Amino acid sequence: MEKGISRREALKRMGFLVAGATVATTGLSTLSSCGSRKKKRIILYFTATGNCLHIARELADPEDTLLSIPQLVKEGRYELEADEIGIVYPIYGHMPPNMVREYMKKAKLKAGYRFAVLTYGNRKCNAVEIWDGFTRGIGMPFHYISTLIMVDNWLPNFDMNEQMKIDKHIPENVERIRGDLAQDRHWVEPVSDLEREQHAGFMQATGLDPEKGFLLRSESQFRVTEDCVGCGVCTSVCPRGNYEMTSSGVKTEGDCDYCFACIQNCPQKAILFARKEGEFFGQGEVNPKARYRNEHVSLASIKLANNQW
């Protein structure tokens, strides 16, 4: 017993120690002196080759909830509530995937803090400005919007084998964003006039509808070759469920986000672009033998994220 304290005080201190030990052994969380609690956070993601799923995982704490947008669409879940809600998606032509855009139009994301991380491989142009304008237009502005450069999986322009050799400092950039989110930073990444001009040039060259982005037809964009062994991977990884096993082989049909989940994840490399001379979306691949999936994400994870059957 310490010198100068009473037996009553000594027993009182022992009581606190016993209580503390009980909490530790039962797994109950101790309350801090200020009564603070862990915020509830939900992170939505859209992934085709695993990039955005990997980043969503990297940004999440163990107790956070990760939700796949294709699965939310499949289940008809549009109302979500948390202290913080984030979204991680890849930009296609500097725009959000059509499925992400359509989901957001129906969604009610109730949160005191909303953040978005937009992944890209080469040029982001004014992707941040597009997302900011879109979400404000639907009455759901985001408090934080940042971009993150990753492996560019745009097959018509890049050789996947060469892309994977480039160090794009992903861990360092993820840590920067994690730091911002830990502080609930309110920030929208700035866009330059040059980036706006580059996007305008891209839209003119492609003729895409800015209100829809990449929304094509899978039957006109992809073809299944004789290398197909009927494994069915394509039927599981397409976020729109456009691939189907039939008695005469694999068939594809339906609205397409041009995410390349089918062509990138086919184990036999049996799915190719339908080449169309003179058309922007008929260039084919730079290297038909090279395919990409994020090294931290399994094929099974992509199937779980996207399967529509």
Image (spheres, helix red, strand yellow):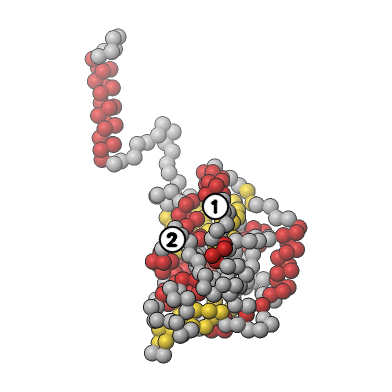
Residue 264 position, x and y percent, is 50, 71
Q: Amino acid at mark 1?
A: Ile
The disc at residue 85 is: none
Q: In this picture, is 37 found above or below 33?
A: below
Other-residue count near label 1 (Cα within 10 Å), few / some / many at <14 / 14–19 / ≥20: some
Which is nearer the N-term, disc 2 or disc 1?
Answer: 1
Horizontally, is 82 left or right of 138 in the view? left
| Dot 2 and dot 1 residues touching (CB under 8 Å) | no
Q: In this picture, is 46 found above or below 169?
A: below
Residue drawn 43% across and 61% down? 297
Q: Quadrant of residue 148?
A: bottom right
The secondary element bearing badge 2 is classed as loop
- In the image, farthest residue toward the top: 4
Q: In this picture, is 231 found above or below 26?
A: below
The disc at residue 297 is: 2
Residue 155 position, x and y percent, is 58, 71
Q: Is residue 257 visible in this depiction of the protein? A: no
Q: Is residue 230 visible in this depiction of the protein? A: yes
Q: Which residue is under mark 1? A: 170
Residue 135 position, x and y percent, is 61, 61
How many numbered discs, if any?
A: 2
Other-residue count near label 2 (Cα within 10 Å), few / some / many at <14 / 14–19 / ≥20: some
Residue drawn 47% across and 52% down? 58
Q: Amino acid at mark 2?
A: Val
Q: Quadrant of the C terminus?
A: bottom left
Work out whether residue 202 or residue 229 is closer to the camera in this orientation and state it.
229
The secondary element bearing badge 1 is classed as helix
Work out whether residue 34 or residue 53 is closer to the camera in this orientation and state it.
53
